[in-house]
Amino acid sequence: MSMYELQDVTLGDIEGQGYAFKRSTAFGKARRGVFFPRDEEDLEKLENAETLTFTGPCYYRTRGPRDREFEVAIVEVVPTRFGPRADFEAIENPDPVRETEVEAEA
């Protein structure tokens, strides 16, 4: 049984199903998620956008899902048997900030 359930969400102005979840990293809390668009053609619009607004449930380990809205970027598009899935992460996550600092040092 899956820990998270697909629910109706919005990514940018595209409706579909998905969820976000919060996890701990070595650098702090990070929010990531998945999104299945209702129409596969809408995925192309999402891939071209730099930032999008996610509106929907965010799961926490110790609590149930809470409705949230935050800025995200698409990390990867994965083909699945249910159709293409867009994986995203929040813009303000500590992981991308760390990558920027490491690149600046190089």
Image (tube, helix red, strand yellow):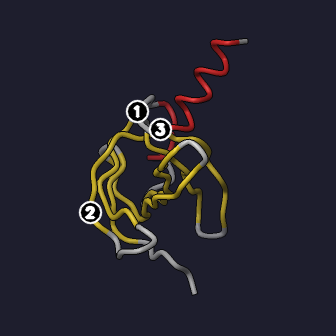
- Within 10 angstroms of label 3, few (less than 14), some, or many (20 or more) residues? many
Q: Please, is residue 71 above or below residue 7 in the view?
A: above
Dividing the picture into quarters, in which one does residue 37 lie?
bottom left
Q: Earlier in the sequence, mark 1 or mark 3?
A: 1
Task: Pick the residue in front: 84 or 62.
Answer: 62
Instruction: Say which residue label 2 marks.
Output: 67
- Within 10 angstroms of label 2, few (less than 14), some, or many (20 or more) residues? few
Task: Pick the residue in front: 65 or 52.
Answer: 65
Residue occupying the point 27% across, 50% down? 69
**SS at circle 2:** strand
Q: Position of residue 24 (x, y in %)?
A: 53, 55
Q: Please, is residue 66 above or below residue 40 in the view?
A: below
**SS at circle 3:** strand
Q: Badges 3 and 2: C-beta atoms under 8 Å apart?
A: no
Q: Earlier in the sequence, mark 3 or mark 2?
A: 2
Q: Badges 2 and 1: C-beta atoms under 8 Å apart?
A: no
Instruction: Say which residue label 1 marks.
Output: 51
Task: Pick the residue in front: 73 or 16.
Answer: 73
Instruction: Say which residue label 3 marks.
Output: 73
